[in-house]
Image (cartoon, helix red, strand yellow):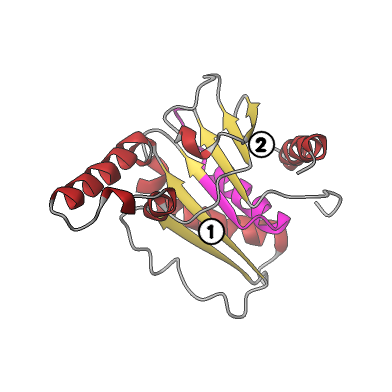
Amino acid sequence: MDLLLKVPKHIAVLIGEHDISYRDAANLVVWCLFAGIPHVTLYDVEGALKENCARLYKEISRSQVEHFGCDSRCKVVLHVKGQELPQKNGQRNGYKQHINVHLASSDDGRPHLASIARTFCEAVERREMAPSDITPHLIQRELGDVPDPELLLRFGVVHSLLGYPPWQIRLTEIVTLPTHCNLRLSEFLEALAKYNKREQRFGK
């Protein structure tokens, strides 16, 4: 991973398969952690990852030990919209590395944006805010102050975004792989290498 010229600040992982391998999803998170990637979004349409976040976190802890030993002092923070996960959160003090894992589903796409729009419209009707107060910065803050992903790994045979928020990935490099099950580290590194080639090609 040290040979890569640049790593993305945010990787999105779209799992377009019916069965989710929590073990392999956890491995992806740990590889991102040790590549120095501060944000990773795990997306599945039905929200299974959000519903089973405790299981995922357990697998992430297992993967850390398996790959890097029990003394690995790294912080993993899970984020789920509308949920507080205090047992997963905490301060960064004393940790060598830190990664934010955002769990998302189709509910966090257009329906979430529509809900924000309704809230703004109601506030304008009540004269609690003016239309001119609704700025891109305000909308982004409501959506969550997370950088747009520079790389999206799409797993499965369906070549669509499956409800992933399209406004977040206008400039995102998309790499499609047949399955996330039994994914190898070498395949993950190949995807990062493709991202690096794109960055060099466009001079970013």
Name the residue located 73 percent from the left edge and 50 percent from the top edge.
7
Q: Residue furthest bottom?
A: 94
Residue at left 47%, top 73%? Answer: 90
The x and y percentages for residue 12 are 56, 42
Secondary element under disc 2, as helix, strand or loop, is loop
Lower sequence index among marks 2 and 1: 1
Q: Is residue 45 visible?
A: yes
Q: Position of residue 46 (x, y in %)?
A: 36, 34
Left or right: where does residue 83 sit relative to residue 145? left
Residues at marks 2 and 1 touching, judged by CB atoms closer than 8 Å: no
Which three-letter amino acid code belongs to the residue tagged 1?
Asn
- From which residue to which does the magenta span run? 17-41
- Taking the magenta stretch, the answer to whether it contains residue 174 is no
Between 122 and 28, the residue placed more toward the observer is 122
Q: Residues within 10 Å of mark 2 (few under 14, many from 20)?
A: some
Residue 96 position by quadrant: bottom right
Q: CA distance from mark 2 to mark 1?
A: 21 Å
Please state which of residues 66 and 115 is positioned toward the viewer in this rendering: 115
Judged left or right of residue 109, residue 35 is: right
SS state under label 1: strand
Task: Pick whichever, 173 or 95, lies toward us.
Answer: 173
Q: Quadrant of residue 30?
A: bottom right
Q: Nearer the viewer, residue 153 or 131?
A: 131
Question: What residue does disc 1 label?
Answer: 100
Q: Is residue 78 left or right of residue 148?
A: left
The three-letter code of the residue at mark 2 reads Leu
Q: What mark, if any, has residue 183 been given in the picture?
A: 2
